[in-house]
Image (cartoon, rainbow, N blue to C red):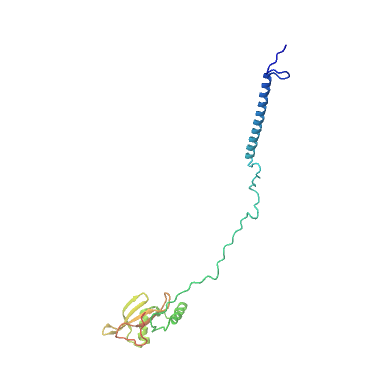
């Protein structure tokens, strides 16, 4: 006679066999889950090694031709304007009353052009020669033909003129000269005297 109990019911497997079957099923489930997880990890690693991710398109290769919008168009440099203002030259008017040999800045500038082109009358550049030409030529004092003193400071000069008397030089007057016009070749102009021996009444000396 066979005795049955709770763990050995009719028609059932013995309890030890049922426990072994349950353990086997659990092991199969765990193995399946573990396999799926390993496959997923392997897929992610492979995708990363190939430089792409799921759902993301691979980047274009370096040899791809850029589109028209990506190309850089050089910007032309601005053309200099021809309407820019030209530098102006400021001409300072003559501050004295022009006496001799020029009557204005325009006359002095005309001599400068002739001198530059052909060396005409170079004595205009020498204050001593200009002073003597004034007394002997313009005034007619032919005996006053000597320079007895000279003082030049910038564009102004004071030339003492005189004559030979009893073996010595006698002082007659001191002429005041100023450069007229512009430039390094501006000529000398007699504008007056600074003594009482030779007085110029006309025209009067105008000081700045």
Q: Quadrant of residue 146?
A: bottom left
Say left or right for 204 vs 1: left
Say if 171 sits above or below 31 in the image: below
x, y percentage for residue 172? 30, 84
Farthest top residue? 1
Q: Quadrant of residue 191?
A: bottom left
- Count numbered badges in the picture: 0
Farthest right residue? 11
Q: Quadrant of the C terminus?
A: bottom left
Say if 4 sits above or below 176 in the image: above
Q: Judge by depth and name the residue closer to the eye, 109 or 56.
A: 56
x, y percentage for residue 34? 64, 31
x, y percentage for residue 113? 46, 79
x, y percentage for residue 197? 29, 86
Residue at 67 percent across and 30 percent down: it is 32
Q: Judge by depth and name the residue closer to the eye, 165 or 74.
A: 74
Q: Quadrant of residue 194?
A: bottom left
Q: Judge by depth and name the residue closer to the eye, 14 or 94.
A: 14
Q: Quadrant of the N terminus?
A: top right
Residue at 65 percent across and 31 percent down: it is 33
Say left or right for 85 vs 129: right
Residue at 32 percent across and 78 percent down: it is 150
């Amino acid at each position: 006679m066979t005795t049955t109990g709770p763990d050995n019911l009719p028609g059932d497997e013995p309890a030890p066999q049922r426990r072994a079957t349950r353990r086997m099923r659990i092991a199969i489930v765990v193995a399946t889950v573990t396999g799926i997880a390993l496959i997923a990890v392997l897929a992610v690693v492979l995708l990363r090694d190939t430089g792409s991710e799921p759902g993301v398109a691979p980047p274009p290769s370096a040899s791809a031709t850029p589109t028209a919008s990506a190309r850089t168009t050089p910007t032309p440099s601005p053309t200099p304007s021809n309407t820019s203002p030209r530098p102006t030259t400021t001409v300072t008017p003559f501050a004295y009353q022009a006496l001799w040999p020029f009557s204005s800045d325009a006359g002095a500038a005309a001599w400068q052009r002739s001198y530059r082109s052909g060396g005409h009358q170079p004595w205009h550049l020498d204050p001593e020669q200009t002073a003597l030409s004034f007394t002997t030529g313009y005034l007619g004092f032919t005996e006053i033909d000597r320079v007895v003193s000279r003082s030049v400071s910038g564009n102004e000069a004071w030339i003492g003129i005189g004559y030979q008397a009893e073996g010595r030089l006698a002082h007659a007057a001191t002429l005041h000269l100023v450069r007229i016009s512009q430039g390094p070749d501006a000529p000398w102009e007699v504008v007056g005297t600074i003594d009482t021996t030779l007085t110029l009444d006309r025209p009067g000396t105008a000081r700045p």
